[in-house]
Amino acid sequence: MHGVRRARQSKEALEAKRRKEQSKLRDYLALTDDVLTRKKRNEWSREALHATTQLLQVNPEFYTVWNYRRRILINGVFPESTPEQIKDLLTDDLSLTMEALKIHPKVYWIWTHRGWCLNNVPSRPGISDDGDPRGWEKELWNQELFVVEKLLDADPRNFHAWSYRRLVLESMPVPKLETSELAYTTRKIESNFSNFSAWHQRSKVLSSLWSQGKLDETKSKEEEFDLVHNAMYTDPKDQSVWIYHRWLIGSGDSRDILEREIAIIQSLLEEEPDSKWCMESLVHYKRLLLRNHASSVVTSTLTQDCIKLLDQLRKVDPGRRARYNEIGKVVVIPNCVF
Amino acid sequence: MDNEGIFDVIVIGTGLTESITAAAFARAGFKVAHLDENVYYGGDEASLSFEEYINWATHAKDSTQFSSISLSSSDALPNSRQYSISLSPSVIPAAGPLISSLVASGVSRYGGFRLVEQVAVYSNHEVKTVPGSKEDIFKDKTISLLDKRRLMRFLVFASGDEDFEARTELEGAKADMPFVEFLKTTFSLDQKMAETIAYALSHCVSPSDKALSALRRLRRYLRSAGRYGHSPFLIGQYGSSGEIAQGFCRTAAVAGCVYILGKEISSITRNRNFDESQSSPTYTLTLSDFPETITCDLIVSSESHFPAGLLGNIGDILRIPPAFPATGEETPSTIARGVCIIDQPLSFVSSQESSSSEEGDGQESRPTLDTGIFVFPPSSLSTGAASSAVTVLVVGEGTMSVPKGKWILYLSTSIDTAVSPEQLLKPYLDMTLSLSATSSSDISIIPLFTSFYLQTTFPSSYTTSSTKSSLTTSSRPDHSFGSSLPTILLSPAPPNSPLPDSGDAAAVNAEAIFWEAVKALKSIKASKKLQKTSEGQVPPTVVREEEEELVEIESFWPPVVNEEDDEE
């Protein structure tokens, strides 16, 4: 902490600290030994369950023990329990994983265990519901959405959380409206557009809405181009924006769109003559023109443009010059632009 | 009774600078007395209840600092005590000397702080919110793509770590170029954008403000953004500057500082010449209607409140140089102020901006604000006469300085010729109220109360009759006894503009005084002991122990010592 004077630790204090750590280590190894021994003999008792709880609280990355825990529940505890008891046990595990996530929000095994818990909730009507047979699941999945949202507020770039969010949205008995999910991605992008996961989610939601006919693809794409231009011009160095733009262009079927976007990026390049992303994108899009619309463009000019841009790229991004050389070789071969 | 009236240092005036200094002295273990002729804390930066304000306005005719005071009515509004009207309102940058002192001294625990919600700028009969961050710029639908790029490029430059003077953008005589011109030529920004940056982000005062100093100031503010929230500025609850000064006084009192309010100083006598023995105190002060005299070795005061005429024979005066050097031009010494109380909310979001939001609830409601700053660039209002920027600070009930449902608007602008503050500021008040009214109807907001006045910073060309008054901080001969010890330290009055600087300037000046005072007091104490031993009163061995007792003062505020284990 700044401005706080560290109290100098005496030799005795340091020695005491070391001894404390040694004893912690010994306890941990003993616990691990105990758990793995029980596992080897396929013990499904409550004591075994308790032992895994202790171990996982200390080290939630120990995926073997998560696995063991699930097998204990399935083989030993669930067969002896009523559906209410099963739900309670799973709710306990949700609390356990929640505590673990607060400290380790990016450990795969905690997320998978959580998903497993929810998928194993018995189908029973819930307390508030009007006899909905999947009441319990509904409540718990709704709560999951809330949990994932809180984690994304804390760290909007946690791809684990985004991936889990997709799982939740898929699994919820009463699905959330995709248009509201679109608004969610808008919020996240507006608060900080340097966020690969948010753009990615947006692309997934839009694709789904377009394919279902719920949103007019052409109009929607125009709005997306507008959004991405604003991001591009605000921060041309942000890679996630360029990746999204490339997704919007897709395979480059529309010559008009390609030429328009090329012009817009060209203007940006004039403002920021060293922008690697501008140059790279221009090369890519001009190649798309050459490949898809060769009959209606001046191929020699486009090819020359690409050569010039690749030259500049080699200077601005020398680490990738070999790649630019390769592209340079291919681009001049007619009918073989890519 | 012996030691009661004997102090190491007497501080005159409870303005913010002096209050911070008094608190630092008390916490460092010095015996301090803190005087103020007013019955309230805060001096020229005081925060007053409504009735106190009316009282102040009616009786301040003798004041050199305040003049041309007008009131729309002499009757206080109901709930007078729920108002805390600041005579010198200011905001605090979230990162800076004042916030550091507030935290380090613990005074921040006495009250709460609010973030200023929005900053807006006036342009062509419109109010426009000012983008302060990348996110703002991204979302702003009124800035073109190219302007977004240029604005971002400038902001990245302005918030960089390198010394500005070393940057190529400032080569040649650019450092002295007016900031607005600099922005237009070096960063290809248009007039509107350049004015927004200069007056609403960097808080420049006049079109002649120079680039280098404006850049340095802007960087301080940019670094404050995001620390406690989006906005770079905080405002102290219960009355900003006056309340904060009072907080420092409270912490001083807790550490043993003695407070005497409401008594004028009737005389100050210097007790001995420079060459005589140093065993008696340097100054004796008498106060009107106060039985005892009080003595000290050092006097600390603000330049404007120093009762120079009372001194018997003047000692060595040391003037602390101002914290933030003038903005390239001679800082005007007078500011025109206006206070206006309304009972309807304002909004800085133009109807164009709010109706294009996604939700489109069709309500035509513009989000209202609790605290905000609205800036008029110089000469932006054709009916206005100001050649400097005009700042309007809006505070609402969240600042706990106004009852529920009321807002105070503080207007201010620097002036260099004598004008009527009401004539000067009224057009700006009217424009603010008409543009920011939230109801779509044409009913303009009628203020419940208005008051205008001029505040003058005491000119620093104060001359003394002493030949020794030309001491500067740099050339300080290192005697233990001797004639060149300063015994009076004067701090400059804090700058009245720009809005966010007066608090930080006060903190920097306070720290400068503190260290000068510590030096002076240590020398005085040491020479006293030496004197005592040479007069045979105290054996030398005892002297050495007492010297070691003079605790090494290492920092402005005593450090917090953390005894716990360093556990992550």
Image (cartoon, rainbow, N blue to C red):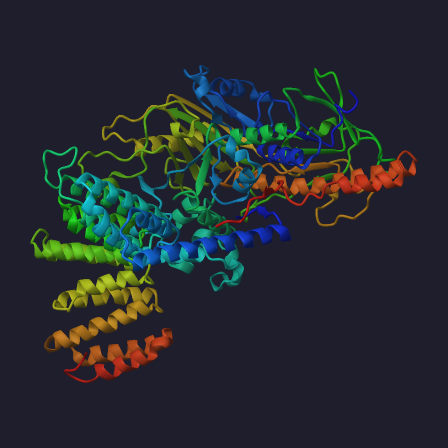
Residue lying at 37% horizontally and 21% vertically, measured from the top left: B448
Q: Residue B416 at x, y = what percent?
A: 53, 38
Q: Which of B486/A37 is in front?
A: A37
Q: Which of B425/B361 is in front?
A: B361
Please tell me whether residue B22 is drawn above or below residue B55 in the rendered image: below
Q: Residue B8 at x, y = what percent?
A: 74, 32
Please tell me whether residue B514 is drawn above or below residue A291 in the rendered image: above
B318 to the left or right of B387: right
Q: Residue B436 at x, y = what percent?
A: 31, 33
Q: Is residue A228 visible?
A: yes
Instruction: Residue at the far left: name it.
Output: A213
Instruction: Residue at the far front: name it.
Output: A41
> Picture quarter containing residue B370?
top left
Quadrant of the drawing holding the N terminus of chain B:
top right
Q: Is residue B191 visible?
A: no
Q: Which of A279/A98 is in front?
A: A98
Residue lying at 75% horizontally and 40% vertically, measured from the top left: B550
Q: Residue A213 at x, y = what percent?
A: 7, 54
Q: Which of A237/B39 is in front?
A: A237
> Picture quarter containing residue A202?
bottom left
Residue lying at 58% horizontally and 37% vertically, measured from the top left: B105
Number of labels in the image equals 0
B9 to the left or right of A12: right
A265 to the left or right of B173: left
